[in-house]
Image (cartoon, rainbow, N blue to C red):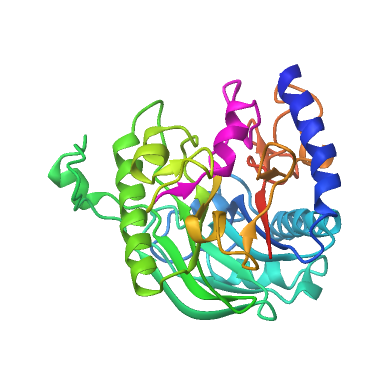
Amino acid sequence: MKRFLLALSVLALLSACSIRTYDDAYVIGFYNVENLFDTEHDRGKSDQAFLPDGENNWTPDKYERKLSNIASVIRAMAEENGRWHSLLGLAEVENDRVLEDLAAREEIAEAGYRFVHFESPDVRGIDCALFYRPDQFKVLETRTLPYDFNTKSGIVFEKTPEEQRAFKTRDVLFVRGELDGEPFAVYVCHWPSRTGEKGSDLRCRAAEIVRDDILAVEQAWPGIKVVVMGDMNDNPEDECMAVWLHGRETIEEMEEGDLFSPFLRMHKDGFGSEEYHGEWNIFDCIFVNGALAAPEDGSLRIRKSDLTHYGYIFNPPFLVQQEGRYAGTPLRTFSGGQFINGYSDHYPTYILISR
């Protein structure tokens, strides 16, 4: 834990220095906002725990405080960076209403965020979404990548055919557009959860689905910049990320079809965005394709956050549990079944890109 906290302190110091280097930078990030539900039942969703008479006693007051807390995190990142996110992927949002309410919060209203969101078949009713600034990003296409078991690479699934037909999870959100006049595509993911070490086959299939789509998009729009972000429920060096998504630790080792994985080196160096049973993980990953990792001069590219790394994990003291059993971990909304007015069980992550 001491090594982890020291590493975070060093990164924060170096990041604060490096951010001033890129005056023309765009901030692209991801945040699992942990169960952003409104207080009304949505038909077909298992959202009963987040109703006023539900298990979490999810009242309008708690909902408003949750919105304010998440908005305050987004604003704090903007204050640190000297600019709002151009693109911010979100996970665990219930519907359009919570996104509208979040974008309208006084803490972030001036950013003028619009959003892209589709309802997914997830039983809990949590989806992925993308906040974007229309003055910087022009949306040209939006769609989803539904989950299926039609593997082309021989993934062996633990689930029976019957279980496969009944399986429901979050769709991947795809948004294509233009950023600073350059063709740009974003995938926002929340891959199947893990129970112990189970489910890796499901996440490998999720990675295969995304990679196949990336290859098709790159063929259709040569030179397009691609960002993949999300809560992958795996670390950057795990099989689904390194083998099936083709995430590479360094730009130098990338080959055609590979993605650069900025948070792989960071995780190896002791950083984390989420803690579970004493182990720090970086499930909240961001990847970029070759056109963004090593483009032609004068084109948008990913920038270093310090001398070694390319990613940022936003974890100022107000986002950290300061005492008790979970001291030193993300300050979440509930602890031990009690509402503690926290933020999320994940820290936000982001990258910078500039010309």
Q: Camera-side residue: 16 or 335?
A: 16
Q: Position of residue 204 (x, y in %)?
A: 32, 42
Q: Where is the C terminus found, in terms of image quarters?
A: bottom right
Residue at far top of view: 2
> Which quadrant would residue 293 be assigned to in this image?
bottom right
Residue drawn at 75 percent across, 27 percent down = 7
Residue 117, above or below 240: below
Does residue 119 appear left or right of residue 12 in this picture?
left
Q: Position of residue 311 (x, y in %)?
A: 66, 45
Q: Where is the N terminus found, in terms of image quarters?
A: top right
Which residues fall within the magenta stretch?
Answer: 258-284
**Does the rendering let one see residue 122?**
yes
Number of disc labels:
0
Residue drawn at 78 percent across, 54 percent down = 77
Residue 278, above or below 155: above
**Does the rendering let one see residue 127?**
no
Residue at far front of view: 297
Does residue 274 appear left or right of residue 240 in this picture?
right
> Which quadrant would residue 268 be assigned to in this image?
top right
Q: Camera-side residue: 2 or 14?
A: 14
- Does the magenta portion include 163? no
Does residue 255 appear left or right of residue 30 in this picture?
left
Does residue 42 appear left or right of residue 352 in this picture?
left
- Does the magenta portion include 274? yes
Residue drawn at 40 percent across, 72 percent down = 143
Q: Position of residue 183 (x, y in %)?
A: 52, 74
